[in-house]
Image (spheres, helix red, strand yellow):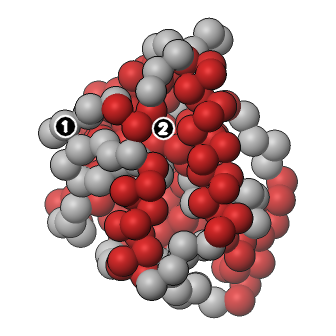
Amino acid sequence: MLPAKEEAMKLLEEGYARNPGQWKDHSIVTAECAYKIAERCAGMNPEKAYVLGLLHDIGRREGVTYIAHVIDGYRYLSALGYDEAARICITHSFARQDISDYIGKIDIPADRLEELKRLLAGYRYDDYDLLIQLCDGIALPNRSVPVDERIADVKKRYGHYPEEKRKKTLELKRYFEAKSGLDIDHLNIVL
């Protein structure tokens, strides 16, 4: 189940009020990118893509965290009954469905990490998982950027970007360019 677009925006605003930061605008850019791509892909619902983009980082409502935001978002949206959006909180950070792809600190206890691994292994990715992974990978807080620019941004902030993750992101870009006919590096989403 998913919230309506208006409810998703309300959840995002409430989360931002609890923990202000650039993650809110990044989430809106992610949603705008997802909508624009999904509306050009046969069989995809652009409204659903938008809502998933808005909520992919909702776990950041709990504070400035790293991998904790993934499981925090999952638990929060699951408690509200929004299982499809909760799933995206887990899947958006792991394009290769491998926990070792996470860029940042592992700031959760061992039992929560095991829960995260179990959840991640239990999903069979669909085009919405893949789309939000891609859009998360091209969204800055104020605009969409080419994949390589976003990778450079992450690398600058965290000191590295795994090569296999980079390859997978480029694979997602090619996949959605073929599916949508769009040039992903030139979506030109600006807040």
Q: Nearer the viewer, residue 128 or 137?
A: 137
Residue visible at 24% across and 54% down in the picture: 141
Looking at the rendering, in which quadrant would you find the C terminus?
top left
Whether residue 51 is visible, yes or no, is no
Which image quadrant for residue 149? bottom left
- Residue at disc 2, secondary structure: helix
Q: Is residue 185 left or right of residue 117?
A: left
Q: Is residue 36 above or below residue 84?
A: above
Q: Secondary structure at mark 1?
A: loop
Residue at image position (75%, 58%) is 97
Identity of the residue drawn at 62% across and 34% down = 174
Asked if one can make out residue 99 in the rendered structure from this viewpoint, the answer is yes
> How many other residues sit within 10 Å of disc 1, few (<14), some (14-19) or many (≥20)?
some
Residue 157 horizontal/vertical position (percent): 36, 78
Q: Residues within 10 Å of mark 2 (few under 14, many from 20)?
A: many
Q: Is residue 191 left or right of residue 35?
A: left
Query: Which residue has dot 1 on it?
Result: 190
Q: Please determine whether, in this image, residue 146 is positioned above or below residue 112.
A: above
Which of the two marks, 2 or 1, is nearer to us in this view? 1
Q: Look at label 1 and name its amino acid.
A: Val
Residue 58, x across and y down, in percent: 40, 56
Q: Please state which amino acid type lies under the numbered disc 2.
A: Leu
- Does residue 28 sit above or below 35 in this rendering? below
Q: Is residue 180 above or below residue 5?
A: above
Left or right of 137 in this view: 140:
left
According to the picture, the residue beneath numbered tag 2 turns out to be: 52
Quarter occupied by residue 50: top left
